[in-house]
Image (spheres, rainbow, N blue to C red):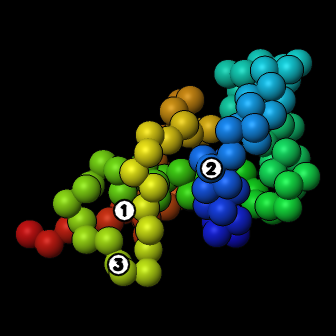
Amino acid sequence: MIEQAEAFFERCAADAALREQLRLAEESYPGSLEIREAVVEDVLLPFAREHGYEFTLEELRTYETRVKLRGARPDLPIPEDEEIDDNPHRFWLLDHGWTYDTDVYPDQLPETEE
């Protein structure tokens, strides 16, 4: 559930000690940090689970895509019930070679009024 990913990253944003634990877990990963799918599967997802958050690699990608697209389109109105974190975001996938794929996620591109 992307709500779980969102909640996890909100908690990380508010908790410096948790961010540091996650940074150390990633730093101690024995494999290549360039293979982001493996880092997410072996580091981020188990770490999130240990702290009560359950989401998948694809849900993380969906969440990051929405956050990144929202940041790229600040002119779009934000629904009243949706809060967007304006702080700079460190993406686990998108800033490491993963990109938005309109064929896979066509429903995620914000619609614009022309």
Q: Earlier in the sequence, mark 3 or mark 1?
A: 3
Question: From where the camera sits, is residue 39 visible?
Answer: no
The residue to which callout 3 is attached is: 79
Circles 3 and 1: CB distance less than 8 Å? no
Q: Earlier in the sequence, mark 2 or mark 3?
A: 2
Q: Is residue 89 left or right of residue 52?
A: left
Q: Amino acid at mark 1?
A: Leu
Depth check, mark 2 against mark 3: the one in front is: 2
Which residue does the image show at 72% across and 22% down from the upper left? 33
Q: Is residue 10 left or right of residue 54?
A: left
How far across and how far down the image is residue 106, in percent?
43, 64
Residue 62 or 70: which is nearer the viewer? 70
Mark 3–mark 1 distance (CA, rounded to whole Å):
16 Å
Q: Quadrant of the C terminus?
A: bottom left
Which residue does the image show at 45% across and 55% down from the upper left? 85
Secondary structure of the residue carrying numbered label 1: loop
Task: Classify residue 30 by image quadrant.
Answer: top right
- Residue 109: image tag: 1
Q: Amino acid at mark 2?
A: Ala
The residue to which callout 2 is attached is: 14
Q: Earlier in the sequence, mark 2 or mark 1?
A: 2
Depth check, mark 2 against mark 1: the one in front is: 2
How far across and how far down the image is residue 47, in percent?
85, 45
Secondary structure of the residue carrying numbered label 2: helix
